[in-house]
Amino acid sequence: MTSKPYVRLDKDNAAVLLVDHQTGLLSLVRDIDPDKFKNNVLALSDLANYFQLPTILTTSFEDGPNGPLVPELVQAHPRAPFIARPGQINAWDNEDFVKAVKATGKKQLIIAGVVTEVCVAFPALAAIAEGFDVFVVTDASGTFNEVTRDSAWRRMEAAGAQLMTWFGVACELHRDWRNDVEGLGTLFSNHIPDYRNLMNSYARAKGGQ
Amino acid sequence: MTSKPYVRLDKDNAAVLLVDHQTGLLSLVRDIDPDKFKNNVLALSDLANYFQLPTILTTSFEDGPNGPLVPELVQAHPRAPFIARPGQINAWDNEDFVKAVKATGKKQLIIAGVVTEVCVAFPALAAIAEGFDVFVVTDASGTFNEVTRDSAWRRMEAAGAQLMTWFGVACELHRDWRNDVEGLGTLFSNHIPDYRNLMNSYARAKGGQ
Amino acid sequence: MTSKPYVRLDKDNAAVLLVDHQTGLLSLVRDIDPDKFKNNVLALSDLANYFQLPTILTTSFEDGPNGPLVPELVQAHPRAPFIARPGQINAWDNEDFVKAVKATGKKQLIIAGVVTEVCVAFPALAAIAEGFDVFVVTDASGTFNEVTRDSAWRRMEAAGAQLMTWFGVACELHRDWRNDVEGLGTLFSNHIPDYRNLMNSYARAKGGQ
Amino acid sequence: MTSKPYVRLDKDNAAVLLVDHQTGLLSLVRDIDPDKFKNNVLALSDLANYFQLPTILTTSFEDGPNGPLVPELVQAHPRAPFIARPGQINAWDNEDFVKAVKATGKKQLIIAGVVTEVCVAFPALAAIAEGFDVFVVTDASGTFNEVTRDSAWRRMEAAGAQLMTWFGVACELHRDWRNDVEGLGTLFSNHIPDYRNLMNSYARAKGGQ
Amino acid sequence: MTSKPYVRLDKDNAAVLLVDHQTGLLSLVRDIDPDKFKNNVLALSDLANYFQLPTILTTSFEDGPNGPLVPELVQAHPRAPFIARPGQINAWDNEDFVKAVKATGKKQLIIAGVVTEVCVAFPALAAIAEGFDVFVVTDASGTFNEVTRDSAWRRMEAAGAQLMTWFGVACELHRDWRNDVEGLGTLFSNHIPDYRNLMNSYARAKGGQ
Amino acid sequence: MTSKPYVRLDKDNAAVLLVDHQTGLLSLVRDIDPDKFKNNVLALSDLANYFQLPTILTTSFEDGPNGPLVPELVQAHPRAPFIARPGQINAWDNEDFVKAVKATGKKQLIIAGVVTEVCVAFPALAAIAEGFDVFVVTDASGTFNEVTRDSAWRRMEAAGAQLMTWFGVACELHRDWRNDVEGLGTLFSNHIPDYRNLMNSYARAKGGQ
Amino acid sequence: MTSKPYVRLDKDNAAVLLVDHQTGLLSLVRDIDPDKFKNNVLALSDLANYFQLPTILTTSFEDGPNGPLVPELVQAHPRAPFIARPGQINAWDNEDFVKAVKATGKKQLIIAGVVTEVCVAFPALAAIAEGFDVFVVTDASGTFNEVTRDSAWRRMEAAGAQLMTWFGVACELHRDWRNDVEGLGTLFSNHIPDYRNLMNSYARAKGGQ
Amino acid sequence: MTSKPYVRLDKDNAAVLLVDHQTGLLSLVRDIDPDKFKNNVLALSDLANYFQLPTILTTSFEDGPNGPLVPELVQAHPRAPFIARPGQINAWDNEDFVKAVKATGKKQLIIAGVVTEVCVAFPALAAIAEGFDVFVVTDASGTFNEVTRDSAWRRMEAAGAQLMTWFGVACELHRDWRNDVEGLGTLFSNHIPDYRNLMNSYARAKGGQ
């Protein structure tokens, strides 16, 4: 087995794809607690903005039981391409979506969505087949249970996707705290209660607050 | 076994005690996920304000490793009595705390804190011994692990405490949606992602959003 | 501790209360798998009909995010009193509901609902306070997570409720297989895959099928 | 709460009731691993013989899907009363069974069976109501899942049953190792792999084997 | 490591193999809850019919303890080849079975069965060795416990099988909701309680039901 | 149900009983991780010394497979009565043990041991029956699995024992940090890694280390 | 990724290596329940004899804390080479062991042992490096916890080992029930309680027993 | 898939990298119990000294919320290079760190740290890309939860890292007990309570202690 070479996330070469985080579909997600999942998805959304990564939103059948995209994502990305797919289950089967992806000019795709084995795995597999480097944000993606999740992860991994989490993505993109201590610290404080506690304890001990 | 009579929460007769939710002590809490725990504590804090329940804050050794009270609680209850205990582990051993509790004139005490078997159980047991009705908010209280939690719950339950959760507390206090549909709905929307999703799906289906 | 006396379910003295099994609220239930929960609720519904127990349906705010009662329950109990509560969270605060319960003339109440710590616990506690014998069907009741469930069970148990499951209820009501082997067998076959398999294996071994 | 007085198992005053450990019904048991469950049931059976406790076997509908009593139990207790109930679900509703129990002249009943909330709980509750001291062997009793188990344990406990396990039963009956070191050691060696390992390690270290 | 190329399920090129879902063998399955497992197997069976995929049934030793194929599968596929193997453990060792597979003319094999590490893994490995593309439906396959399951998944994955679940299979086969909204919706409504709830909530909000 | 009155641990009225923490018997403990269990037992041992509580050690059959008392306990309590029981399984059946307990003149007994349902539960139940107040240290007691543990806890709780953990015991005995900040801090630092981290972080932030 | 070719177990070309199942070391095994583990190890031992596979036993430091090989294995394989290694941790570093393996003339090695990441993984990796086909029996191998187990499995899998379980090994070796229905049935009946139950239920239904 | 060749740890060619085990960051670790994690990290530290492996310490932002390196590690490795990184998140981006690694002249890198998907995975991936053999000590590395851990392990494994645990590392480095029975025994006794118990039991049985 020759090792898979280390492809490292690069903020100048990455785009974020948020697939089908819709209010109805979210009720299907049971492999992760709702409080934690909401936090992870919003953390990924915030980091996309923080690193100014081109971001693409897409939904499946908003005007039906699947429900609308969660409003926080719409509000966070007002100028992002928003592809409301008329029927294609695999977002990559939708021409507008693929065009929007290619229009970013980025080679590295950071993907999350609901449900993992379909809305994430299908476009991930298709994008890899076209030569993109795919990074799946596992903790901002959700599905029915741990069996469906595990099968999805294994299928994407076998195809060459890299499995990451939003925190790892943020760290690999940022590279060096000195680029902006305050900005990254704020991102972590907003989405990692334990880290916020560390910051508050430290500030108090230092004599502040 | 004669049954314990049904003591029902009454918003005109209840006070909320938040005990030692400090930034350092929170790192000891491992029987509940940090994202969920933060949400539950803030939900309890919000419902205290929403129902205008007298609320008392207390801390143990803020100027040391235990750290300050989490800032969100300080900000949410700017006029609440805040008893920084100089050393008493059981808040009920602090005269100022007991005075503040009695000054509310309420008979029903809703208690949550960190860690469950000490900061919650000790004042709960003491308050019961003095004739108060005690309602422990289990999901806004945290401790080291499930064994310590379970022991704490059993000890308090054997002494006559009622075990509840923040959602049950809110519902028992509110009694009837017609008292204020929007207010309770907002409380739930802010702290129950699944409920927020239901509301957003419903609004979209109704044609709005 | 004097022991709680054995109150045994009696099909001539029992009624079933199904509280708030609504399509929206069900998305809040995360302490039990959806496939299993659906099966348990329908099993309880079927046994109510099988034993011809008076059954009462009630909902909270059907014309909103909570959604309608699951259609299968409506269809299974076409003549059951159906109390769509205008706002009361505790069904026992609704006069029509209590009237309907009392109209059955039954002393034993079998209760299940969503969510456990509110829609089940509140009427259960109120009914006990009025002298009814309450049997909670734990596996046909659901809630947010195991902490909220456990708190609800303990509170009801301390008040004197008996915790049962649909299978135990069916067996205690039936008393003797000879009363109707085929009927009870069908109920089990429809709702316990393992039991259905036993029956099919037995039939084949006997030479049939 | 006055404490429940300590009723201690006494080998001269105890009988063992094994209820419905049938080959078909065992496929319903999913709250304990089959290897461990088989071991626990046989350990209880062995200790009944070891302490020469009167033992009663009973089954429900052997000539149907429930299947026969597991042959090991039949063989281990060739002279025990064996009550094949024609239809009563609660063994205590069967006159022959109650007669057999009373014929032992024992006041303490050690009960285990399948499934816990029915075949164990029903006769346990009935026996308590008639003044017997009931000891439930929790780990030699099995049921569908942890929810049904927990409900059954709580109902029996509230009624005054003492919850034990086969190892605790053996130890409380034996009282003092000096009564028979070899016999008790053999019982443990046969049913506790870790204890057998301790004995073998010790023997080797002592120079033997 | 060169990535495994994306082989996408194609409804014109796929067949379904259901291996040894027999009433006796099902009692061995303990890595998934029986209610959920039954639902998943029937969902796979329904999707095979919905997409009109050639389907092959096979069993091992029906006239013995393994028991007959579950009757629902027999009824759902009345014209499917049904290979009752006289002794071969690996279905692929049975000539009739392989002939039936090859007679479908399909290159993609969707396999599920009981138990995973034998009845699924053996024919899967053999089929891959003959050049078929194999898709294992993990959640419609069951086995003794999570260790046996995990070992089976890893062995098949290392050999090149793609691990999927019934929902992912349905979505990848369907490709576009517009091909038939109602049909796919019905399949999901029948086998995903959460999705059925979304549909019912939506219909009510829209004013219908 | 009248509430159990609050009996509060009092360092002038409490003794510690360490029962059968022997090197062989410890291999039977599987309801708690060995690293954590070792830490909890040593923490309890340390707190007994820190609060200068009379401590009694006892063992069962040291010169056999059960093995010797763990050496750390022997070394920590060189002057404690050490009752090597010749055969009694329940330590309370040993006259020397009971004499040693009574010789302390203490009314409150803090008990921990291996295995919970025997070595802890038996003397706990016997001591309660003689009028002692019993506090079981649940996390310094271990047994075969969670079923045996749960049964033991329930039996002791029903008899009136209070379930605690070593941390709660230390806090209830200490009452007020001002009695000795450094001593209690050291106890916590030695046995709670998270607390030690808080102390080290605080010291560094304060400018020291 | 080219697929790993299907290497199928062949009873004429396989040997069994049982590594360090010693009475002391077994107390380190905590990733599997002792009852189940004992059963799995003895099942593997029985199948080695049933298929007449050459079997090799080895131990590490028997005359010390590790303890002797479990006596059942010694008795089951009286003529098997038994290599008591004087110090080598990796059995493959012991010349006598490797000679014994090579003397079997078999190319397929079925390995199990304690602990997985050392006593199994080291010789497995070494054997693969010398060209053997290695089949790890995961459920007859044990270790400290699931993290150590998982790391061991992944390391061996990456090196090309096939992960199996004793049941899968038995089935792949046997190939066809007709080779010996009774023998294989007995093996399963002795080590799979669920299967034994199926056989007993079937026999009774057929009219026998 | 060609198998990855067996690269075996060699004490003359290995170095240990301990990355960011800082008192603040440790509060983020929730995929492993704190008692166990502390023990594992110190065990790895001890084995580094025992085998006299060059060891490198590094931290990120010590003078802030992340906190100082845990003092035990500083004390254990007084002469080790200690690289306090001014900002680089990936230690491999820090020139001094890479220089220190290369200065060891070792080809095999044993890495552990906090948190796994960042502080361990990033330098591990970078080191592999430069041709080092990387061995990740999974149980001395910690992170937020099991999802983040699993993603990190998979990413490193796909890149060619070998996943091990501290015990496996110690055994593979030592090779033969005869090299130093006492030293290795002491390492195990200090960090594996079960092994210490075996040693104490053995010593007693042998007549010593």
Image (cartoon, coloured by chain):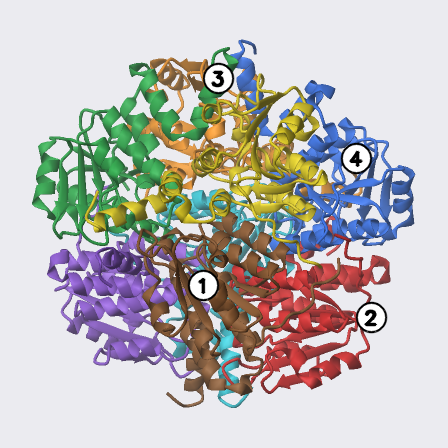
Chain colours: A brown, B purple, C green, D orange, E yellow, F cyan, G blue, H red
Residue beneath the point at 43% across and 26% down: C195
Residue at the disc numbered 3? C202
Residue B56 appears left or right of E91 = left
Dot 3 falls on a residue whose secondary structure is helix
Tag 3 near tag 1, CB within 8 Å: no
Q: Which mark is residue H13?
A: 2
Q: Nearer the viewer, mark 3 or mark 1?
A: 1
**Could you say which disc has been placed on residue G74 in the image?**
4
Q: Which residue is mark 1?
A: A96
At label 2, the amino acid type is Asn
Chain at numbered mark 1: A
**Which residue sits at x=38%, y=37%?**
D148
Real-space Cα distance between discs 4 and 2? 40 Å
Q: Do tags 4 and 2 sit on the same chain?
A: no
Q: Quadrant of the C terminus of chain G?
A: top right
From what the image shows, is residue G72 above or below residue F65? Answer: above
Q: Residue furthest top?
A: G207
Residue B173 position in % (x across, y down): 17, 59
Q: Are marks 4 and 2 in contact (CB under 8 Å)?
A: no
Rate crowding at label 1 as few (under 14), some (14 to 19) or many (20 or more) other CA atoms within 10 Å: some
The three-letter code of the residue at mark 1 reads Asp
